[in-house]
Image (tube, rainbow, N blue to C red):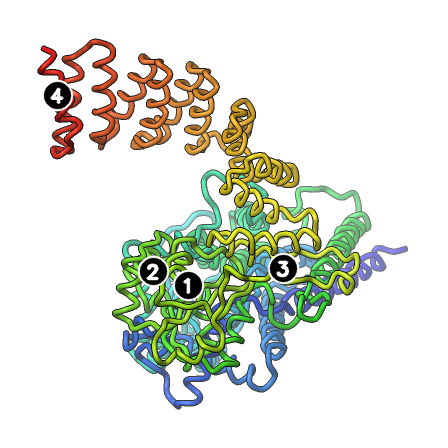
Amino acid sequence: MSDLFWKRLNYLTGLAAIGILFGVAVLTSHLEIRDLDLWLHIGTGRFIVQNGYVPTQDVLSCAISGMPWVNHEWLFQVLVYLIHQAWGPEGLIRMQVVVVWLTLILLMFLGYNREHHLLMIFSLLLVLLVYQTRFTIRPDIFSLLFFVMYIYLLSIHIDKRWVPFALVVVQILWTNMHGFFFFGPLFVLIGWVAEKLKRHCALPYEWNKVGRLTNSEYGRLKRILVFTLLACLANPLTVRGAMYPITVLFQLPQESKIFFNYILELQRPIHWNDIFSLDRFSFYKLTILVSLYSFIFNRRHIDLSALLFWFVFLLFSLVALRNIVFFAFAAYLVIVTNAITTPFNQIVPLRFTSKRFQYLTEIFIKLFFIAWMLLFGFSRSLGSYFDYDKFENKSEMEGVGLRNFPHKAADFLVVNNVKGDIFNDFNSGAYLVGRCFPNIKVFIDGRTEVYGPLFFKNYLRIWEQGDMAFFDQVVRDVEITLAFLNSITDAVPEKILKHLYGSKEWAVVYFDYDGVIFAKRVPENEKLIQDFEIDLSQWPGRKMDLFRLGVQRVSPYPFIHRAFTLQSLGLDEPALKEVEEAFKIDPAAVESYKIMGKIYGRKGDYTKAFEAFRLVAMIDPGNKENRFNLAQTYFDLKEYKGAIQQYRAILAMEPKNIRAQFLLARSYVKNRQYDKSLEALRVAHQLAPHDTVDLLAIGNIFDQDKQHEGAREIYELAISAKQPTAEIHHQLGLLYEVLGNHQKAKENWEAALKIDPENTEIKQNLRRLQDRK
């Protein structure tokens, strides 16, 4: 067979690989609805359509009603509301598929070169693998589409007269769709800066010549920059709306930093301790390496605008997880830009004896990509989980995710036409807006830029820190009449759960695996409480139809969630009923044993607690929290060697675990291994030099065991902390008194009195010491 045959076969194999790649893109983007913020957009879109205007002040929240709101996503919100009204969830999923498909088509056109099929397929596949991490129906998908449209028009059609008009239209749409609209003028600015440098600076190699614009194109680029900047003003708030991204950008380093710690998509994708790890965002890291390599092999002919473009979006992606797809797109564009004029043998560091062998090699690699993509797509299509309402598996490729939203709790509010101002957790706010607004006004939702960092800190003061006095004050000030505590993904914090359940002012009106709803005893809730009040102490437990389930293995998460909530309230018997049913469904459900262990540990039945936590550690040996629980039961049973073994196993996994280090020291001293206890305490003190509570507790055990020198060293370590307590000085004074060093005892008691001048016990000790003299 001739070289021409293999060349054509190579070309056809490349087309097949491209077709399959787009098929996989359609399949993986046809994903069930999981995103919380989508419901906020639907609810806001409904308000805009029904009222005929875009709100410039908050209308959704009971806590910040009237707060200024730059709603830069209103056009997307109207679009998703109308699609949802017309075609339901499936319509929104199909919208995402179309947007993703169009975006990838434009990317392919930008990088298409029949001589470099293989490189384009590989690069586009990398983009897809990064892109699919953000297949959520949010304004981001339109930002990515406009991103590619801009590059397509600027790089291919810059010489056309109609381009400025087209970019203005794209910019206006982008400005009203998503806050990343500033990328449009930024692209033009990068191109203008690069062109100016090419014209006025001496650059290395042939950088001054590569990608140079004609004078006509350069002039058009400057006009486009002005037009696109002016197009940003075409929004409901004109200048204020156009300035929104800059305002947010300047807030990020100071005030809004707290959001980066608590919201996953705002966290950094790469940290110093995992920079070489393949477990986290491996395709993103590979994209960085491949695009960097493209600059290296094309170093003599680099287009400066591509280099600046790549660098800006690399920095942008390193800031937050949600930005990595934008870098993947930028990386793809620079890879194909760098490769477009480079011979194959310079890109791939291999030398072929004949063209036929080169074509065969490319065909083989493309067939490998085809096989890999087919397997990847097939595995994704098989994703499913059990629907307890329908007693059948639900595909992850359609409908609304059952494991992401508190469906039943929201249904309760909607079906019973419940109205009021509600306290809710952060994750529930957006969903409640989409499902229950305007009957329900939320306390907080996902609009962090509207609520601001101070409000979010106050929310955390309630939800995370458990300040219930502050919660009661907020309830009075905001006039909250309902509380919605979502447990669909994370357990409800114990403090707020117990506070509401133990209060005579609140009644439980809804309880299930997805949350608890409390109604305040006010006149407007009287009928609701009368019809639906639940006494959880008499909770009968839910039963599973095991005959209908058969031998199918499913996760008993509804039973585990209910059990965890009941166990948090101290309602052990109702919790055990749910756990026992979970065992019937899946005897290997780890969480069931964990809940059982906690219940038996609280009851003082340490043997049964040990048996439960032992099984948990066997099923999931790599889980540190499971090891901690097992170690505690060993300790409670006075089996200190077992506790030591577990704490050492934890420290083998995480050497700087402060909690494990202190508990190891405690277990050693209980096992009368005093030297090892001191050694562990020294390490713990280095890791946590301000911790005095644990040092004092272990020092007291040394003292009780008459290990006075060891106790003295531990107390001295505690005093070396920045804020030693009066109790530490008191205990050290008592120890010196036993050792006969009355001067040291007096010094420590006097130091204790400076910290706590009203302590009568210390005063008595000093008086006794003076009398003895």
Residues at marks 2 and 1, CA–CA distance in whole angstroms: 8 Å
Could you tell me residue 280's position as x and y percent? 55, 47
Residues at marks 3 and 4, CA–CA distance in whole angstroms: 79 Å
Secondary element under disc 1, as helix, strand or loop, is helix
Could you tell me residue 434's position as x and y percent? 48, 76
Could you tell me residue 731's position as x and y percent? 25, 23
Q: Of label 3 and label 2, which has the lower sequence position? A: 3
Residue to which mark 4 is pinned: 766
Q: Are marks 3 and 4 in contact (CB under 8 Å)?
A: no
Residue to which mark 2 is pinned: 459
Residue found at the far right of this picture: 1
Q: Are marks 4 and 1 in contact (CB under 8 Å)?
A: no
The residue shown at (31%, 80%) is: 56
Secondary element under disc 3, as helix, strand or loop, is helix
Q: Nearer the viewer, mark 3 or mark 4?
A: 4
Residue to which mark 3 is pinned: 124
Q: Of label 4 and label 2, which has the lower sequence position? A: 2
Task: Report the disc number at residue 496.
Answer: none
The residue shown at (32%, 64%) is: 248
Q: Are marks 4 and 2 in contact (CB under 8 Å)?
A: no
Q: In the displayed structure, would residue 598 be above or below residue 246?
A: above
Residue to which mark 1 is pinned: 426
Q: Of label 2 and label 1, which has the lower sequence position? A: 1
